Image (cartoon, rainbow, N blue to C red):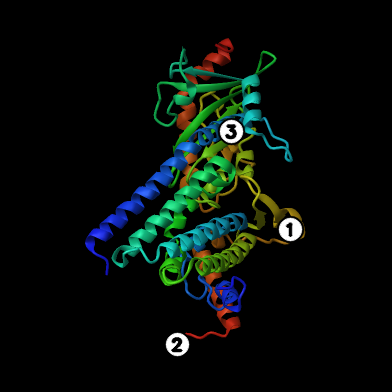
Amino acid sequence: MELFSTESKKIVTDPLNVNNPISLQVLGICSALAVTIRVDQAIIMTFAVIFVLCSSNVAISLLKDHIPSRVRIVIMLAIIAGLVSFVDEVLKAYLYDMSKQLSVFVGLIVTNCIIMGRAEAFAIKHGPSKAFLDGLGNGLGYGMMIILVSFFRELFGAGTITLPNGGAGYVLFSIERDVEWLINAGYENIGLLVLSPGAFFILGLVIWVQREIAGLEEEE
Amino acid sequence: MHSNRYTLFFVFIITVVLGTLLSVTKENLKLKQEDNLRADVNKTILRSLDFSEEEDNPWSNEKVEEIFNNSIVGLCVDSEGNKIDNVVLEEIDIEKDIERLPVYLKVIDDELQGVALPVAGKGLWSTLFGYIALAPDLDTVLGIQFYKHGETPGLGGEVEKEWFTNNFVGKKIRNVEGEIIGIKVLKGKVDDSKEDAIHQVDGISGATVTSNGVTIFLKDDLKRYEAYLNEIRENGII
């Protein structure tokens, strides 16, 4: 197949919009709640998920004719867990600060339903290049959503926007530092947004807006 | 449908391949990972002792080692304040070993400029590991830094952030009688008009358990060093 055909393009762009793994398939919500407290963590998590998703999709797609269907879920899980541990070890050796910052989240990628979901729904039925594009598309769709959610949570919850930079992150914008008059006028951060329920509220709103834009309705 | 024999065979092969891949990766990266870990701990000690890296020029592992070797003296004491010789400091289990206590002295031009002590204890999910450094009066906090924890980022994980650690600088660990009482992490902000404010720091909202944990283990761990700290106070470095 052509790598740049309309069909390939659709595989990548669909998950960004009308078939977004988080807002429409509602997969991978668990980590979307956990890593969306700060923008920098969401960005780094996005890269890690894209890497694991693409490589697990390709690996499973290459093995698809040989995997016994009765144990396919176990095999997929083993491959995904192996890849995640591999990423974790490499990060610890070469990007120590980043691995420290991601801490438990790298391990948690194993339990991200999107990866298992794409393996079972797509990679096991399609060739490696399509599977790669599907991984890329879904990874980007996931990343787009968690970065969006983390943007609102960090801005209104903690009053800052932090970008990835070594261990501590680089504070791009801080209400306390950059918009002093607002603080003087009595502005306070919404602490609730930093807690898990805050993620649900934001995510709910995002899903609503996205479905509204995509023109989708629940089937009765 | 594949046969049982094939299924077992396939699972076996996958396990062996993945296992081999992972152990080879781990073996090859082990030395580098250990280097990083040691440099990170040493960096934590240096930072707590008020060394700071320039913003556009972060320390490499070698640089950390160089500064460390030039200005830090490590030694081991027991809970009575006596020095114990021939101990490899890196091998001491900081959380569990209460008989062998590592101490890092910042000595520049033969003058004691600070003392860094390891602290460790439970937060909400994990054990936090860090160093607290005291100024030569052995009362004022010079700095505190954490290098390892598994607390929720954005909540308990904020302990490693500058805004939190900076609050400790200049606080006192001893009460008027000279007894070690540690530093209390409050729930909410410190009221500076109160008398106790000098022993308190702002808490982390949404992380009460982590904050309480820090309060408790700081006090417990500092208490262990009380004998040694009093010893230096009276007789100078031993």
Q: How much space separates mark 1 and mark 3, taking CA atoms?
A: 36 Å
Instruction: Specify the farthest residue to the bottom.
Output: A220
Residue beneath label 3, please? B44
Residue beneath label 1, please? A184
Q: In the shown orientation, is residue A63 left or right of residue A40? A: left
The three-letter code of the residue at mark 3 reads Thr
Q: Classify the position of the N terminus of chain A by image quarter.
A: bottom right
Q: Classify the position of the C terminus of chain A by image quarter.
A: bottom left
Nearer to us of marks 3 and 2 is: 2
The residue positioned 55% from the left and 43% from the top of the image is B159
Comparing A196 with B186, the one in front is A196
Disc sitting over residue A219 in the figure = 2
Nearer to us of marks 1 and 3 is: 3
The residue positioned 45% from the left and 40% from the top of the image is B26
Q: Crowdedness of circle 3 by 10 Å Cα count: few (<14), some, many (20+)?
A: many
Disc sitting over residue B140 in the figure = none
The three-letter code of the residue at mark 1 reads Asn
Q: Is residue A170 above or below residue B145?
A: below
Chain name for mark 3: B
What is the quadrant of residue B110 in the picture?
A: top right
Indicate the position of residue B64 as horizontal and vertical percent values: 63, 29
Comparing B113 with B38, the one in front is B38
Indicate the position of residue B37 as horizontal and vertical percent values: 53, 34
Labels 1 and 3 share a subunit: no
Nearer to us of marks 2 and 1 is: 2
Q: Secondary structure at mark 1?
A: helix
N-terminal label among 2 and 1: 1
